[in-house]
Amino acid sequence: MTPTEKDRTSYIVQGEFRVSRDPSEVLSTVLGSCVAVCLWDPAPKVGGMNHFLLPAAPGQGDAKMLRYGAHAMEVLINEALKLGARRKALQAKLFGGANVTDALGPIGQANATFAPAYLNDEGIPCLAKSLGGTQARRIVFRPVTGHVRQLIVDGAVPEQRPALGPLRKPRARTMSSCSDRAGVRRPRRGWSGAALPARRCPVSSPDPDADRPAPVSGPYQRRAACRWKSHRRAAAT
């Protein structure tokens, strides 16, 4: 089944479902460890699809959330019946349940086990299924005919985050005596604690007559400044 230009695509994300009887509408979703159930009745041409994350809710308060398979399946079946589908004539196809990453645990396997068991308990035949594996899937489903197109998506869900290199210990740095923007050193203090008179820093001196070299960019800037300091000291003596 290949969508045409006249088709209208509805995207189903995690925790959603959609039922339709529109011949020009197709339903699409991308699955990793989640499972999508494509359900339809061929006679009245009514069908729908859901997308659930986990088989069942961990507590009573979350039992009616569509991200859980038990509630998502019940809602999908009831909505299809409202549009004219017959419960005894419902057919299904299953997709997803991949173990795309070890960080999530066996969620994909649990979903892949739950979905066929639920259909079997409800007496709904499963005509086709593609469950498990380690790769993501893109599903395109036409609800009025039950035709499904599956595409394997390589690299859509990374198995793990890229490993970071070892953290380096920050290098200890000494405070420069010429840290002030105005070129004045921080107050110096003698052995008695009294403040000594401030003096100009030769590197950042604003004296226009000072023979200061042009700034050098790159890794040689500090080396050039040190050579100029040595030259100034030698000239002072």
Image (tube, rainbow, N blue to C red):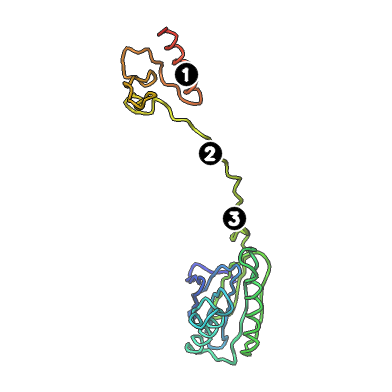
Residue at the spot of label 3: 161
What amino acid type is highlighted by mark number 1? Cys
Judge depth for marks 3 and 1 and give the one in front: 1
Mark 1 burial class by Cα count in 10 Å: few <14, some 14-19, many 20+: few
At a point 56% along the width and 91% down the height, the residue shown is 87
Question: Label 3's element?
Answer: loop
Vertical arrangement, residue 164 with respect to residue 19, above or below: above
The residue tagged 1 is 226
Q: Is residue 5 above or below residue 223?
A: below
| CB contact under 8 Å: marks 1 and 2 | no
The image quadrant that residue 154 belongs to is bottom right
Q: Is residue 210 left or right of residue 86?
A: left
Residue 170's label in the rendered image is 2
Q: Looking at the figure, which quarter contains the C terminus?
A: top left
Mark 1 falls on what kind of element? helix
Q: Earlier in the sequence, mark 2 or mark 3?
A: 3
Q: Where residue 30 sits: x, y (%)?
A: 56, 67
Judge by depth and name the residue closer to the eye, 231 or 237.
237
Tell me how far mark 3 sits from mark 1, CA to CA.
45 Å
